[in-house]
Amino acid sequence: MAVVVALVTLVLSAGATVANGDPLENDATSFTLGAAVRGAADARVPAAAPVRVIVRSGTSAASPSLLGAQVHEQRSTQLQAAFQAMLQTQTSAPVTAEVDPRIDRASCALLGRTWGGTGCSRGACLTGHEYAKTGANAETCRIGGRRGASYGVEVDFRRCQALNRVWIGLLNYCASDPHRAETVVPDAPQCRAPYTSYVLLTEQDGGYDECLRPSRVTTLQATATATGRSVASVAAEQSRTQCGWRPAHVYLDGRCQEALTAPQPRVLNNVAVVGDSITWRGTNELATLQPDWVIDGSSGRQIDALDARLDAYRESWGEPGGVVLALGTNGRTGWREEQFRASIDRVPATTPILLVTPFREAGTTGRPELMDQYAEWFGRLAAERPLTCLADWRAEVFADRALLVDGVHPTTIGEVHWAEMIDNSWSSCLSRNAFSSF
C-alpha cells in the first residue's frame, strides 16, 4: 500500500492528535493527518474519481473561529490539501466485502479482527470473539457477548491522544483492551510509548482507561498498597487529565475532588455540536476546522436526545453560545414536531442554531421514511426562528451518493465533505445574521 509521505501539518489549539498510533507528546501543538491520508480512499470512491470538496471563497468578518479568520481559512485550505493528497494515494488491492487493505496488521489486531492475507478481514473476528459493529468502515470486535467489551471505543480523538492511547483514524476508534480482568497491562499495544502501561478503569466519561509511564504506575501501586485501595481507584483519583472531564470537579493537592462551589464555565460562547454516528465519524475533520467546538457524537443516538446532551454540556461548560444539531439519522417513531420544538425552546432565543438535515437511503434500517419528516421540521423552524439556519446534508447526498459508504454513513472522503459543509454553513449563518460573538 502506497503511503503519502509529505503530509500537511494542521495546528490545533486543543493539543496534538495522533494518526495511526504515531507517538506525539501531550504538549505538542500540531499533528500530521496520517490516518486520513495513508491509503484512505474508500472502496466506493476510487482515487481517480472527482470529489466535491467545498472550496471557501472567503471568510466573513463574523468568522466562527475564535483564533481569527486568517487561521481558520488556513485550516480549511490545509484540510482540503491533505485530502486532495489522499486522492493520489493508491492501495495495492481494493477494499472489498472481505478485506480492507488500508488497515495494517497492528491496527487489525487492535480491532480484534483476523488478517485475511491481503488485508484486515471485514467479516471475521479472532477466535472466540464476535463483531461489536459490522457497519462499513466501522468494523470492530468484542468479547463477552452483547454486553461484552469492545476493542475500540467512540472517544473523541483528542481525548484518545490525551489518554496516551492509539487512535485508529480510518475507523474513528480509540483502541481499547476488552480483557477486563487485569488492573494494569504492561507493554500494552493500545498504548503509545513512553506511556506503555495500560490502566483499566471504567471506559466511561471521566474514567476512561489511561496509558501511563511504568514509573507512574509503580507510584500508584505503592499508594494503593499503603492505603488499602485498588490501583484503579487511586489512578482515577489522581488523573489530572480526566479530572477536567468530570463535571463539578477540580484538581487540588494531587487528586481530583468535588468542587466546593459551582465552577465557572470553562469556555464562554462556545459551540455545542450534538449528533449521532455521522458526527462521531466526522469529529476529527470538524475539529480540525473548529478546534474550540465541543463535539458530542455517538452511534445509535436518536433525535430526542437533544435535551439530555445539552444538559450534559451545560453541566461541564455552561450555556452554549451556539448549537449545531446533527441528529435524526436514527428515526424515532412517535416523536412529534411539538416535542422537537419544545427541546429547541430550551435554548435561549439569542443563541444561533444550525440544523443539519439527516439522510438515510430507502431500504436501510432505522426508519428512513422519517428523514423527509425531520427535514420538513428543520426547514420550518429555520424559517420561523431568528438565528436559525440549515446545513443541508440531505441535499449534498442526493447530489452525490458516492459520499456514503453504505447508504447512511459517509466515506472517509465524505467525512471531510460533511465537516466542510457544516463549517461553511455555520459561517454563512453568522454572516447573514450579522452575529460576531464567535
Image: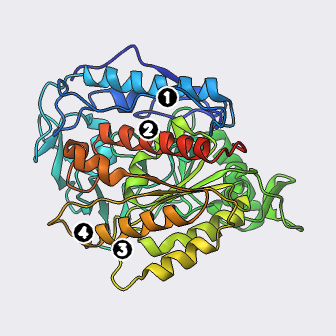
- For the residues labelled 4 and 2, the Cα–Cα distance comes to 24 Å
First in sequence: mark 3 or mark 2?
A: 3
Q: Secondary structure at mark 2?
A: helix
Sequence order check, earlier mark of 4 and 2:
4
The residue type indicated by label 2 comes to Glu
Chain-order first, disc 4 or disc 3: 3
What element does badge 1 sit on? helix
- Nearer the camera: disc 3 or disc 2: 2
Question: For the point 26% across and 71% down, which residue is it?
Answer: 366
- Give the image's coloring scheme: rainbow
* Residue named by callout 1: 76
Total residue callouts: 4
> Residue 420: which disc?
2
Image quadrant in which the N terminus is located: top left
Q: Which mark is residue 147?
A: 3
> Going by the picture, which residue comes out furthest to the top?
6
Instruction: Identify the secondary structure beneath mark 3.
Output: loop
Name above or below for residue 178 compared with residue 401.
Answer: below
Question: Marks 3 and 2, Cα distance to the nearest angstrom?
Answer: 36 Å
- What residue is drawn where x is 31% and y is 26%? 38
Query: Pointers 3 and 2 in contact (CB under 8 A)?
Result: no
Residue at x-position 40% and y-position 21%: 81
Q: Amino acid at mark 3?
A: Arg
Quarter of the rendering containing residue 42: top left
Q: Which residue is mark 4?
A: 368
Left or right, 244 with respect to 11, comes to: right
Q: Are marks 1 and 2 in contact (CB under 8 Å)?
A: yes
| Position of residue 213 measured from the top left corner of the image (x, y, whole percent) | 61, 39
Give coordinates of residue 5: x percent, y percent.
36, 15
Q: Are marks 1 and 3 in contact (CB under 8 Å)?
A: no
Image location of residue 203, percent across then percent down: 52, 61
